[in-house]
Image (spheres, rainbow, N blue to C red):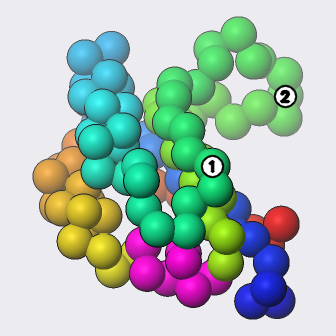
């Protein structure tokens, strides 16, 4: 499957779920996780509180969506110094992180 794109979806539940903390994480995503080689799509944002159907997950605060042109690009991103700095600088406020990697 290495010829397919990889959708890397990450959902952060924060210890401090204040609006300020949520915006701080989104800003960090925008600063550290954009512009990586092989990225074809990037976005980060808040959970839409108006999505309240039974099937909607209501537990996370921030969703990160990155699509890479290949698994190789995804793997390079995972070990990139900017990605590692993002983790180091923000992980103390993460209650949980759910990651979904999908070939698309």
Q: Quadrant of the C terminus?
A: bottom right
Q: Give the image location of residue 73, x and y in percent.
A: 54, 77
First of labels 1, 2 by sequence position: 1
Is 32 situated above or below 27?
below
Q: Which mark is residue 50?
A: none
Is 14 situated above or below 71?
above
Mark 2: which secondary structure? loop
Most frequent secondary structure within the magenta stretch = helix
Q: Quadrant of residue 80?
A: bottom left
Q: Are marks 1 and 2 in contact (CB under 8 Å)?
A: no
Q: Give the image location of residue 40, x and y in percent.
A: 64, 56
Residue bearing the label numbered 1:
41
Assess whether residue 80 is covered by the magenta stretch. Answer: no
Residue nearest the observer in this picture, 56 or 90: 90
The answer to whether any part of residue 57 appears in the image is: yes
How many numbered circles does the render carry? 2
Query: Marks 1/2: CA distance?
Result: 29 Å
Q: Residue at x 42, y 62 (%)?
A: 36
Q: Residue at x 69, y 62 (%)?
A: 7
Residue nearest the observer in this picture, 22 or 52: 22
The answer to whether any part of residue 9 appears in the image is: no
Which residues lie in the magenta part? 71-77
Residue bearing the label numbered 2:
54
Is 26 situated above or below 64?
above
Left or right of residue 83, residue 38 in this image? right
Rate crowding at label 1 as few (under 14), some (14 to 19) or many (20 or more) other CA atoms within 10 Å: few
Mark 1: which secondary structure? strand
Q: Give the image location of residue 10, x and y in percent.
A: 54, 53
């Amino acid at each position: 499957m290495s010829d397919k794109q990889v959708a890397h979806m990450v959902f952060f539940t924060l210890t401090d779920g204040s609006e300020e903390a949520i915006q701080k994480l989104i800003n960090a995503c925008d600063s550290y996780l954009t512009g990586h080689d092989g990225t074809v799509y990037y976005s980060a944002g808040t959970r839409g509180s108006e999505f309240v159907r039974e099937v909607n997950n209501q537990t996370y605060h921030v969703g990160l969506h990155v699509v890479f042109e290949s698994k190789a690009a995804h793997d390079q991103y995972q070990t990139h110094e900017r990605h590692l700095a993002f983790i180091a600088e923000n992980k103390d406020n993460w209650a949980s992180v759910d990651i979904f990697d999908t070939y698309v």
